[in-house]
Amino acid sequence: MTAGASSMNGEALAWRPASPFPSDPEFTPVAEASRDAVMSLETPFLNEYSAGAFASPRTPQATAFAELYESLRDEEFDTAVARVADEASAIAESLSYEGENSGGSRERQRQAAQGYLDRIATSAEAALRRMDEETSARDLAALSESALNEYLDTIGQHESGAPSPVAEEFVKKWIKKAKQAVTGAVKLAKRGIKAVTGMLPHTWILRRLIGLVRPFLHRVLRFALDKVPVALQPIARQLAAKVLGSDVVKAATTSQEAAAVDPRAVATEMDTMVAGYVVQGESFTPGVNLESMSEDQASSSSRDALRELDQARAQFIDRFGRLRQGEDPTPAVEQFVPAVLGVLRLARNIIGRPRIVSFLSGHLARLVQPHIGEANAKKLAGALVDAGLRLVQLEGGQSAVAATAETVASTLEDTVARLAESLPTDEWESPALLEAYSREAFDHAVAANFPDDTVRGELHEAHEVKGVWRRAAGRRFKRYTRTPSVVLTPRMAQSIPSFKGVPLSTILRDRFGITGPVRVNVHLYEAIPGTTVGAITRGDAGNGGPAGIPPVAPATSAGSTTGTADQATPSQGAPASEFDVHPLTETTAGLLLQEPGLGRRVDEAYLETPHALAVGQRLFRLEFEAGEAVARGTQVRRFRSRVNAAQGSVDVLINFSEATAQEIATALRRKAPAGVVLNLIRRAFEPQARAEAEGPSDAVQLVSDVAGEDSESFTRRWVRRLGGSLRRAVRGSAVRALASHIERNYAQVATDFDAAANADADGVTIRLTMRGLPWLAAIGSRSLESVDSEALTPAAPASLDIKIVPGYAK
Amino acid sequence: MSVMSHPAPAARAALIELSRQLEHWRLAAERLVVPESIASPQAWQSLEHYLGVSLRSTIATAADQLRGRIAALAERLRDAPPEALPRLRRDLLAVRQLYLRTETTVDFFADALATRSTEPMGSWLRACDHLATRAMAEVLRPLGHPVPAALTFADKGAGAAIWKMGLRLWDGSTRNPVAAIKMTRHNLLRPTAALHEVGHQIAHVVGWNTELRNALQRALGAHGADVADTWAAWATEIAGDAFAFVFTGYGAVSALHDVVDGDASSAFQMIPGDPHPVAHLRVMLGIAMCRRAFGSGRWDRLAEAWNAVHPLSFADRETRQLIARSTPLLPAIVELVLYRPYRAFGGKALVQLVNPERVSPASLEQLRRDMGSAGHHSRHWIWDEAIRVLALTSYHTTSDTAHLREGVQQQDAVMRRVGSHRAVTLQH
């Protein structure tokens, strides 16, 4: 019934709010809340600095710092950190016992994870000490750049003492970072920029790095155990700002809640620290103890927000389950809501405002009241089973009442998270706004967590696939209770972007060798506070389906290519890798499943890497019905570029997967025409670099020449305004440069590519440095606003430097 | 189990003994299915996850069946009257038989897993899994059939074998969850036999055996019922050889030759009911396939060598006559087997599903040039083109002694890499 409606005799009818549930006789309007609450405004956000577009030029030290920092940034290191953290989490989680007191269990988990990280630290320290011994007597500054690189390639071999392949990979990446730091230190020393340390620059930085291993891993331990993004103190960044005399632009905040700590934040801090040490020496951290720098700020040292939430959730389920029809659930909701708020960075400050908490809790309690009692629970339980919740879960001890209580708990968590995302907390003091937004959030949460049979039609997320989002017992993520079965065609796969905008077709080709249509079961997940991609791949190990056992006949409608594979198959299947989990946006859900409502829009920042997910973000994993689709484990092709307007150069890095590298090498061995070879190269990178790619793409990065602005934020500003044109300009110029080079130097290209493809490394990389690009001059040092996108016309460079190397070079 | 009380001491004594024996088998059945007693943790870990789960599930099902029978018998023993003794005793013996058959099932997989738990054998066998699975997928996927999982293991003997997926196992009720392929140790690094064995699995899944048998019967009927009957009876093994040929070319024929070669009695042995063709005809049929698909080549030298070593005069009269009447028919049989469309293949011929031209000597030479020196380590080649790489190394071994040695070494390197990659990806 709408507001303003009239009865038959012309009197205005009282407005009744619409419930998300189709028949809800118990639903009553919300009482008007008091408006005289005085709330103090607190911002949860850290102070943000910004540099003007025309800030003063950098000092030589600041420039050196920026260059070194850029050279230290290594995505593979970030990934290695994420994996180590995930492994530490897994070790800790394997020790959680029900019934044991939380303190004892927590301590045992911490010790186990600490033990694992200690072994990694020992291995890394030993490797760096060996490097130090090998280099301490050498004057590396006397070596040319190529000689230095060659020399560094020969050192740093270490005996593996790491406890796992993942840990071993981390140690290797740490050694690589040390080599990068040494190279940077030597280069800067040659330019006359070196910290006063009393010893050779490379010796000094190596010894610093040895000392940084344990504090760094201690930090990793913290976020591996806590998971919830605490306010990571950007100590190093602030020191850089202070010491180098420039302000630093903080990484962009998003309006969405991160599900867990982004390992890049920790890795970035490390790179900033190392760059600062190389440039400033001891004076970079005057009087600061390294160990204390690894401690995060404030209350997180003793809090465990996720565990508190788990306990509060269990208590709520118990209390709600024991309520009888007609009883008031407000006390139960009131004890639960603060715990939910506690894990949300965007809403944590609300905990200290009891009036808001009370108002919100009362409002939510009224919304969930209709589901109290056994009779209501039984109805819902039946609908849950129809939606794919396995009956065994109910027969295994979980009664209908408990299943209902769990559904309500999930709905409340979901509601609060959506509310925090949609309404800034400084506006929660307005009861009307709070009620309106929370009601909307509740509607969407119900649509996600309750079976469609109990939800109003217009709220349904899906039309044909009828499931619910359910948190599996003991898992820190939600899974959809239905697993749609679809035929994934090459066109579909080309149009579906994974993280970093890499088309799904590229991943299927490069990792699985699949190029044609293939039938897949699509497993769907949703991130909740604490979800990491490792939690998903670990927790879903075995949910893959066995080869050789025919899939359940899909329930297809005429003309449809979708069906539903029953979730009844038990744990059978290989555990997924993080590369096999992809973002499920609305567009992707529409393309893949013809159900856009199952996808969820997220900020671009959460489409960059599977290691940084947003709360509520949805993801999918493909399970191939053919058992032979075991991933080769090879890298996927990549296209990256760095535009340095000040230096007038564009560096392009094209990483070819092993499959595409061999394809190109074969063409060269067969002396295919230059155009054929060029097309193979273009085909390898253009799908990723295309301007119209949805979501982020790290295809273009701009190097800032503005003091006080790091490349990431600089790039973000420029790409936001000129992204498509820039990518076109870079890509087009690279293609023209390659065309010209291949035409003129075919034999040399064939020899070099052949050698690189024959090497025992995965893939091949082409590095281009282009100079004298007309459109680059158009950017120059102009402000962003004054650059015309039409000026960014692809053109051949005046000069080109090209290297073809084996492997996935950076 | 409670002691029976009965006036007849002898019967009571017999029932007590029955109960005691039954308890023995019950305890044995409990021990039978403990995973660690079947195979080491490393052996289980060397399997793909779904394979491991499939095997454990099958073993558990067999054990449950056994335990169920034991429990039911125990229940009946509880208050059994003396006149039930004979029946109960028969039931006990049946339970004992079931235990032994179940044990055979468990032992089969335990032995298979044991051969995979050490290196480099584990890598070699995982590489064979890879070859087998890719081959099955290449044919079955386009035809819309699910692809069975493959579990390869090593054992002694001259020839490979397969226990097809879906086959009823020794316990009588459970079905084989995997295509279990036995590879002989001597041929592990020339594993074209794996493609022959998966050919059996493929033929079984698509129903080609019956179609081929009928086709041979009809086509050769004009040449005598005995000839037609004999060749029709060999349909399943011809099917296996055909798949090995289309996948790996002459290398498969040469490897087959090395397995079946022997003295006169083995070259011309004909055992009634044996689905394997007479070795002479089997080798000649393979050579005929090569001639049809590739023209002249090294197989001509093989034919010459075989005929020189195994003159027909060494065969008995009946076999000699069969060979004499069959030899002119070989080209027609090749046409029938490789180039004729079959319903089982969706109306296509086998060569349309797996084109042997890809493994002709010329194509293999082109492959060798295309691969460069990356061919034995590049994950693209050894993984995506594993079957053709095998065809190439196998063809290499057909040249002479030095090349055989080289080919085996190359295949060894390739299989260790594939096996090692597979192990890593399983753990990811």
Image (cartoon, coloured by chain):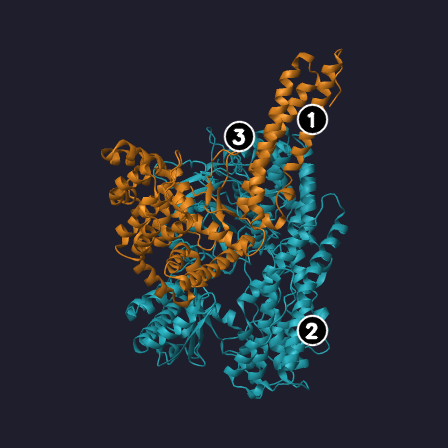
Chain colours: A cyan, B orange
Q: Is residue B264 visible?
A: yes
The reply, left or right, for residue A646 in relation to residue B395 is right
Say above or below: A448 vs A59: above
Q: Chain of mark 2?
A: A
Q: Which-is-in-front pick, marks 2 and 3?
A: 3
**Residue type at the position of mark 3:** Gly
Q: Which-is-in-front pick, marks 2 and 1?
A: 1
Estimate the x, y position of residue A204 in percent, counting from the top left: 66, 81
Which quarter of the picture shows residue A384?
top right
Q: Chain of mark 3?
A: B
For the point 54% across and 86% down, which residue is it?
A143
Estimate the x, y position of residue A448 in percent, counting from the top left: 53, 42
The residue lying furthest to the top in this view is B7
- Please name the residue that numbered disc 3 is placed on: B172
Check the picture and name the quadrant holding the N terminus of chain B: top right
**Residue type at the position of mark 1:** Gln
For the point 43% across and 63% down, which residue is it?
B406
